[in-house]
Image (spheres, rainbow, N blue to C red):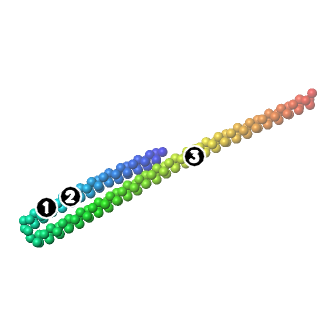
Amino acid sequence: MLVVVVVVVVVVVVVVVVVVVVIVVVVVVVVVVVVVVVVAVVVIVVVVVVVVVVEEVVTVVVVVVVLVVVVIAVVVVAVVVVVVVVVVVVVVVVVVVVVVVVDIVIVVVIVVEVVTVIVLVVAVVVVVVVVVVVVVVVVVVVVVVVVVVSSGSSSSCC
């Protein structure tokens, strides 16, 4: 029973640690996305200001390149977020499946132990009943033999 309690405690601790790690990873990813968006907005504003001030064709090309780089960066961050979320979901599902399998194994072990105890109790009861029946039969046979022998000897002597 102590092993079952230890296994359950370990599984609960592992699940709690996985949930905390998932929450931390999601928060970090959200913060990274927010920082990237803020940097992108700042870059866009700076580039727009430069375009307005300088108004040169080269600056417009730089703005387009920067915008393309920012869009690519946002897409890369979004893909990383999706991959992290998928990995976290897979880890959580695996942990849940392991917990369910461990619980099923624990239940099966308990059922086997209960059935074993029931079989042992039934076997003891059967042995006791057989012994009592044998003793009763022996006593009855002995009494019948004694009665028959004593009634035969008393009638022959008189």
Question: Can you name the residue that lies furthest to the bottom here?
Answer: 58
Q: Amino acid at mark 3?
A: Val
Q: Sequence-wise, which precedes: disc 2 or disc 3?
A: 2
Percent position of residue 53, x then y = 7, 65
Residue under label 2: 35
Q: Is the C-beta separation of discs 2 and 3 under 8 Å? A: no
> Is residue 80 positioned above or below 106 on the image?
below
Image depth: mark 3 or mark 1 in front: 1
Q: Secondary structure at mark 1?
A: helix
- Using residue 40 as the reference point, say whether residue 148 is left or right of it: right
Residue under label 3: 115
Q: Amino acid at mark 2?
A: Val
- Using residue 135 as the reference point, say whether residue 47 is left or right of it: left
Image depth: mark 1 or mark 2 in front: 1
- Using residue 149 as the reference point, say whether residue 85 is left or right of it: left
Q: Which label was assigned to residue 111?
A: none
> Is residue 89 positioned above or below 114 on the image?
below
Residue at the image position 18 percent from the left and 58 percent from the top: 38
Image depth: mark 2 or mark 3 in front: 2
> Closest to the observer: 26 or 155?
26
Residue at the image position 65 percent from the left and 40 percent from the top: 125
Q: Sequence-wise, which precedes: disc 3 or disc 1?
A: 1
Q: Secondary structure at mark 2?
A: helix
Q: Amino acid at mark 1?
A: Val
Residue under label 1: 45
Q: What crowding class fits label 3: few (fewer than 14 Cα within 10 Å), some (14-19), or many (20 or more)? A: few
Q: What crowding class fits label 2: few (fewer than 14 Cα within 10 Å), some (14-19), or many (20 or more)? A: few
Residue at the image position 85 percent from the left and 33 percent from the top: 148
